[in-house]
Image (cartoon, grey):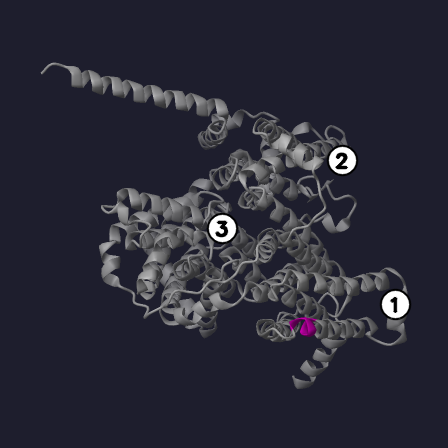
Amino acid sequence: MEALNALGGFFTSIGGLVADPINLLVLFGAVVMGIIFGATPGLTATLGVALLTTLTYGMNQSTAMIALLAIYVGGVYGGSYASILINIPGTAAAAATALDGYPIAMRGEGGRALGLTTTASAIGTIIGMIFVVSLSPLISELALQFTSFEFFLLAFFGIIISGTLTSPDLVYKGWIAGFLGLFLAMVGRDALQFYPRFTFGNSQLDGGLEVVPVLIGAFGIPQIIQVLKDKFVPKQAAKLDRIVPDFKTIGRNFKHIIRSALIGVGIGAVPGIGEDIAGWVSYGTAKNASKTPEQFGKGSYEAVVSTETANNACIGGAMIPLLSLGVPGSPPAAMLLGALMLHGVAPGPMLRIDHPGFIGEISAILLLASIAMWIAGMLLAKQVVKVLRIPPAIFMPIIAVLAVIGSYALGTKVFNLYLMVPVGIIAYFLTEMGYPIAPLVIGVILGPMADQNLRRGLMISGGSFAPIFTRPVALILFLVIVFTIVSQLPFYKRWMGDLRSRVAERRQARSSSGANKPE
Amino acid sequence: MMEKKQLRKADFVTSILLILFGIWELAQSFQMPMRDTYGGVRNVWYVSPALMPLVIGFGVIILGAVLMINSIRTGGAADFIKSVQSFSLKISDSGVRFIGTLLAIGTFVYLLIPRVDFFMSIVFFLSFFIPAFAFDSGEDLKKLMVFYGGVCLIMVILFITPAADALNALFMFATDVLILIATIGLNIYAARLAKGDDTKRSRFRTGLIVAIVTPLVLTPVFRFFLLVPLPHEGGIVQLMQIIYYSLR
């Protein structure tokens, strides 16, 4: 009965949203803007969500969510344009798509490839949406049983796992980034005793660092510096024929779509891990499962369909921990968290109680955004491709202006700008030196949750850490954190290496003794 | 991202900075109330505001030390010492572009936005930022940086001395007029640099249009539709206000 009620609420939400022409206008406008952001190398879905957040300030909550989710969906999908047509991923999420998308375009089938990625992305988003609507309430229900220790460990787990999985160089660089993010979150008066921490007597810092300017600085400024410093030159795009949805190929690859969607949702649900990892994992899995793995890298449709389904399904996955636990599943979701707080919505276990129907509304928006993305992709692809010809030296300065005014407009504080620039420069140097930015951002967002819940938990237990070992969820989280850290230590890696070689030796010995046995 | 060898070299410097940062952070944390009374509340260690900062400080020091050990083991520290011995001040082309980007963003945020009319500050900023990189010439970038940097330096002197206030008292929006003159000068200079090169001329034209259209769209959107009070509303924004309210 509850499921039917939820379904009813879901369709009511769709009806309510579609009935308002302004919503439809915002939906299509934001999707197209997202596609442009995704398609343009140097701009990302996260940056799109960050910059649009400011413009949604004056909108009502539903319209704002439509705008932000639509640009997110469009941005993740739009990355495939540059991957397929110029062999440069528009976003990191579409990096795996370039491996096979570009060879397809080189065969003169760019339109067919884009048609496939458009349909696959739409299906991926819809499958992700199904998981949001079905899993989020269950996880919220479970999370209502969480005490302060579980929330502390959850926040810490988010930072550690994000650091472990997103680090392009040494794993502990991800953890360092997470700790730096946690430090930034400590600036300002603490919520329990109102004591000013690291404010240097500056009253502007009393309220802490505002999340949105920090995020815009961390994602926007490094992007601008990198593109202009490295002198990115736009390449000649491959010729684009008619965009066709090619449902036959989609039907033939249906099992790849389902598997990739599940991978996307699963990876999206892990805190801080973005669409790029979903794309690569899905690519690898599709190659291993394929009957024609030799075709991968030479223009395989299976590959393109798999990566694009996974990265868009990741959106739904990333929304699950965001809505049910208040922990963002990906960098754009972290930006969405900032936007939600701006609109007076505090995601987490209490969301279903404070804002009943909100999860249904988000799912409805995801469905509408995927439909709008499909329509816009089919109709406007040829026009959107023209943005690939604009030199970055023209649009990057505009992005700089938007980043500055975006950071200022939310709190109308020039001080936010003064903070955004150093955060951006530090983030740029960190990126150059192989530190991932996602854990830093996750640290900034989850820092207050970790701090307050640790102290609150200890206050209740009288300074004892025993509840961590007596409460099952807390114990599991604690063990996962310990295992994640220990598994990266050299002694563990050596031990695992020895174990693997011993097992291999035994197997070899067994098989050779079996072969030597007289028949 | 840097190459592997460069990364290990950078790791050595970063590890030192991280350890120093961790020590500073711990020193700050130990000054926070741990046992004594704060705001009428008697503290115990586990509710102290220092608890999480202490965890972070120790974490950063430990991870910084691990990074340092790895850098020493992999030869990063030795490479760093060698590079210090053969240090030269020659800045590469990408280094100049990096400085140019920082110059543009830094002056825009710290100098122009808080003190100059919002519209004019964007036009001036874009008039430098777009041609400087769109011309795709290291020499032009350096020349434009010198021109733009010079104007910014004059503006800094004006604003840190009572000169700007005196000028504005003499006639309204004097600093905005100065920026307007500087913008025109900057554009004439950029046009001269683009002379004789069709690609540069076309990019200069596009840049000029973008530099004017961007604030022309953004200013009304933020000021009149989103009702955001702009950081500095000078002559042009006030003119826009007069037009907007006379049309309403």
Please name the residue that numbered disc 1 is placed on.
Answer: B165
- Prevailing secondary structure of the magenta residues: helix
Q: Amino acid at mark 3?
A: Leu
Question: Which chain does tag 1 point to?
Answer: B
Residue B180 vertical placement versus B159 (above, below):
below
Q: Amino acid at mark 2?
A: Tyr
Is mark 2 in CB contact (under 8 Å) with mark 1? Answer: no
Question: Which chain does tag 3 point to?
Answer: A
The mark lying in front, picked from 2 and 1, is 1
Q: Can residue A57 be spotted in the picture? A: no
Question: Which chain does tag 2 point to?
Answer: B
Residue B115 vertical placement versus B41 (above, below):
below
Q: Residue A351 shows which numbered tag?
A: 3
Is mark 1 in CB contact (under 8 Å) with mark 3? Answer: no
* Location of residue A201 in the rendering, given as x and y in whole percent from the top left corner: 79, 45
Q: Secondary structure at mark 2?
A: strand
Q: Secondary structure at mark 3?
A: helix
Q: Amino acid at mark 1?
A: Asp
Q: Secondary structure at mark 1?
A: helix
Q: Of residues A485 and A496, which is closer to you in this image?
A: A496
Residue numbers of the magenta segment:
B190-194
Q: CA distance from mark 2 to mark 1?
A: 44 Å
Q: Of residues A313 and A62, which is closer to you in this image?
A: A313
Q: CA distance from mark 1 to mark 3?
A: 52 Å
Q: Quadrant of residue A16?
A: bottom left
The residue most toward the left is A519
Residue A211 vertical placement versus B151 (above, below):
above
Q: Earlier in the sequence, mark 2 or mark 1?
A: 2
Q: Residue B38 shows which numbered tag?
A: 2
- Residues tagged by mark 2 and mark 3 found on one chain of the structure: no
